[in-house]
Amino acid sequence: MKAEIQKLSDWINSSERIVFFGGAGVSTESGIPDFRSADGLYMMDYHYPPEQVISHSFFLSHPEEFYTFYRKFLCFPDVQPNAAHLQLAALEQAGRLKAIVTQNIDGLHTKAGSRTVYELHGSVHRNYCMKCGRFYDFEAVYESDGIPRCACGGMIKPDVVLYEEPLDGETISNAVDAIAQADLLIVAGTSLTVYPAAGFLQYFRGDRLVIINRDATHMDGQADLVLHDKVGEVLRQIEIRPVGV
């Protein structure tokens, strides 16, 4: 693994248009469970299938049950950025990382200090009244009881993309543009099975594709470098040099 880490470090420090594409595995080292592993969210024993609970139709038909599940399994008020989040923020500050494209809704990239973050599936830190559009923060929803209500009486909805809902068009456009312009694309912590997000990789025209994931993916054979390890453990070993140094 030492040789692979050195190669990744060299590639990072010779690139100026890096894009990072990340999934649930980026946040597991912060204590947030992923979805599809043996102990992931979708494997849990719940009286509704988790995929059904986090669907648009279930949200509308069973909002109280949705929020019980949402607060318990998708909200983590005390979670902190891990080495992966912090190193990516440092890469951006060094002038090498141009954008983060994430499938996560935890907001940890922003909390770590990253500025250009395209959240494909939204964020638990943004919530809006479905009636008047008023904004509410994470605490307003997490600390409420039952169905969170706006001052106008409308139901508040998290700004997260549920099953049966489309991704935001502007976010898609920004993410695709960033990937298309990248000279190095680092794909990490994702099984690359969730579409349409996983399909964004087809727009990459750069020099090097790197995959960092605990388990093998169907894209491993197309990557220039593959590291089967935890994302934070890999990135924390990279000594970042600012552009021009």
Image: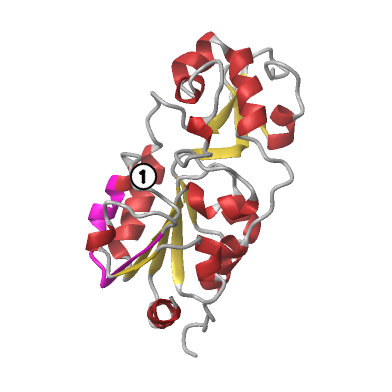
Height in image: 69 above or below 17?
Answer: above
Q: Is residue 233 magenta?
A: no
- Please tell me which residue lies in front, 58 or 25: 25
Q: Using a 10 Å C-alpha cutoff, classify the residue at mark 1 as few (fewer than 14 neighbours), some (14 to 19) or many (20 or more).
A: some
Please, which colouring scheme is shown?
secondary structure
Name the quadrant of the N terminus: bottom left
Based on the displayed image, in which of its 4 quarters is residue 99 positioned? Answer: bottom left
- Could one spot residue 134 in this view of the protein? no
Secondary structure under tag 1 reads helix
Magenta-colored span: 199-212
Q: Is residue 61 above or below residue 189?
A: above
- Would you say 172 lies left or right of 149 here? left
Q: Residue 140 placed where, x, y %?
A: 73, 30
Of 122 and 2, nearer the camera is: 2
Question: Is 136 above or below relative to 164?
Answer: below
Q: Nearer the viewer, residue 32 or 148?
A: 32
What residue is rendered at 61% in x and 27% in y?
70
Within the image, what quadrant is residue 195 found in? top left
Q: Position of residue 134 (x, y in %)?
A: 64, 27
At 32% from the left edge and 56% from the top edge, which residue is drawn? 177
Query: Circle 1 is placed at which residue position?
Result: 172
**Where in the figure is residue 207, as x and y percent of width and height?**
26, 73
